[in-house]
Image (spheres, grey):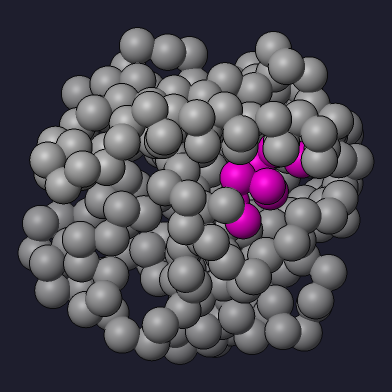
Amino acid sequence: MKNIIVPFDFSHNSRNALEYAAQFAKQMGAVLHIFHAYDRSEVLEGVKVATTISAMEDTKAKMIAQFGLSANAVVPKVVQGEFIEEILTVINSSDVDLIVIGTRGSSGLRELLVGSNTVNLMQEVRGIPMLVVPEKADFHPLRNILLCSDLHEIADDDALDIVKEIAMAFESGVRLAHVDKGTGQPTYEKVLEKRREMHIFEPEVDCTYKRIVAKDIVEGIKYYMDKKENNDMVAMVYRTHTFVETIFGMNHTHEMAYHTVVPLLVLPEGKDKPG
């Protein structure tokens, strides 16, 4: 992992995500890119762009002083334009390995998620992992990564490589968890997929398996996390759903982004960058 980008708007949520990303980047040996976009209305309303640029330089200095990063390992970038459009431009023109973005966490109101930068970016970015950091999440060395799997074949076998890379950097374990809505035995195909996914991590990473029986996937994961409080990161593959499901339902990865109290690593199913 070489480059991590953090969308930053000076809010408490984004600052917490930035502080988490700074420590994460140091552990991974990656360069931290701090991204801020402002629109034309801010200029028309008298917001001084020079002040924003200066504030970004101050933020860089704080990251260096607070977390011991080198000057070359922190790169601030300020652009004018719409957030999603501009950050996609940066991602397409750079070798970005991970996006770290903050969220306010669970609101209990799904309608508040519409128009959210977190969800919008999750839908637009197909080929780059995204780490969603809740506002109350504190950084500490990872003990266990909870990898939530539906045990369906993943289009790209490399999708789980970043989980292995992170686990090896932190010397953490990986818990492969599958929520089963039924009480019957797993199908032969799911057994094979479980073995395949666990084989990706072994022998370098200690990988264990947990089958969770629950009627709801997100509730099942939350129940398991309540029982096992030493899961320090949750990882899920973002599956592309149909238009109808997107409008009238909600992707399980979206739900976890707003219900987990620990960082959620959203894994792309394929390698394609956003267009």
Q: Is residue 124 visible?
A: no
Q: Relative to 219, say whether 100 is above or below.
A: above
Q: Is residue 243 left or right of residue 228?
A: left
Question: Taking 41 as reference, is 94 above or below it?
Answer: above
Task: Locate the C terminus by quadrant.
Answer: top left
- In the image, 59 versus 45, the foreground residue is 45
Q: Which range is magenta?
A: 16-23
Q: Is residue 162 left or right of residue 268?
A: right
Looking at the rendered structure, the number of numbered marks drawn on it comes to: 0
Q: Residue at x 42, y 13 (%)?
A: 94
Nearer to me, 60 or 156:
60
Q: Quadrant of residue 246?
A: bottom left
- Reply above or below: 33 against 101: above
Name the residue rendered at 61%, 34% in the picture: 58
Residue 93: quarter of image: top left
Residue appearing at x 26%, y 51% in the figure: 120
The chief SS type of the magenta part is: helix
Whole-percent x and y of residue 217? 47, 76
Of the 4 image quadrants, the one containing the N terminus is top right
